[in-house]
Image (cartoon, rainbow, N blue to C red):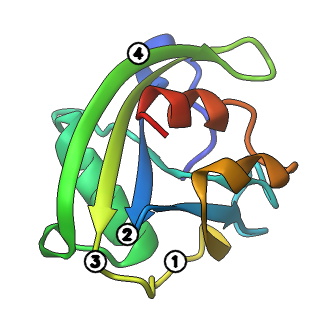
Amino acid sequence: MTPPPTTTAERTVVAVVVEWRGRIGLFRRSAAVAHDRGRWHCITGYVDPGRTPEAQALQELHEETGLRAADLTALSPGPVLRLEDDDHHPWVVHTFRASTVVRRLQLNEEHDSYRWTAPAAVARFDNRVGWLDQVLEATGR
């Protein structure tokens, strides 16, 4: 993902919570990215101009995990959140919940690790992105 844009309109992203057998996928941001390095996150990406949030969610899933639409048993949109980052910049976050039958993921350079964890155990990941809990709550996790 590129550095955060400067206008509110450009700060529109998708946030996808990936599930496998009732467990949530948490993804640790790698040193190759400029934002949130080393922090646990869901799958995210800026919504490209002219793309729907759902199409962007599918693209980000494929790019960051190797998952294709055929690997999903469900992709459900959640509420659109309006959040602020640590610098008080506003973000529009289109949330999604994706269920997959695939356990082994193929990470790209944005992440260096992932874990399938029980929803109740997410709190043990103390180095998670600040708004991850809001995205999990919005998607019913």
Could you tell which of marks 2 and 3 lies nearer the N-terminus? 2
Residue projecting furthest to the right: 126
51 versus 121 height, above or below: above
Distance from label 4 to label 1 (Cα)? 27 Å
SS at mark 3? Answer: loop
Does residue 22 appear to the left or right of 40 in the view shown?
A: left
Query: Callout 1, which amino acid?
Result: Asn
Could you tell which of marks 2 and 4 lies nearer the N-terminus? 4
Instruction: Give the numbered dot on residue 101.
Output: 3
Residue to which mark 1 is pinned:
108
In the figure, residue 19 lies in which quadrant? bottom left
Q: Position of residue 97 (x, y in %)?
A: 34, 46
Distance from label 2 to label 3 (Cα)? 18 Å
Between 80 and 97, the one lying in front of the other is 97
In the figure, residue 111 lies in which quadrant? bottom right
Of the two numbered discs 4 and 1 in the rendering, the one whose residue sits closer to the viewer: 1
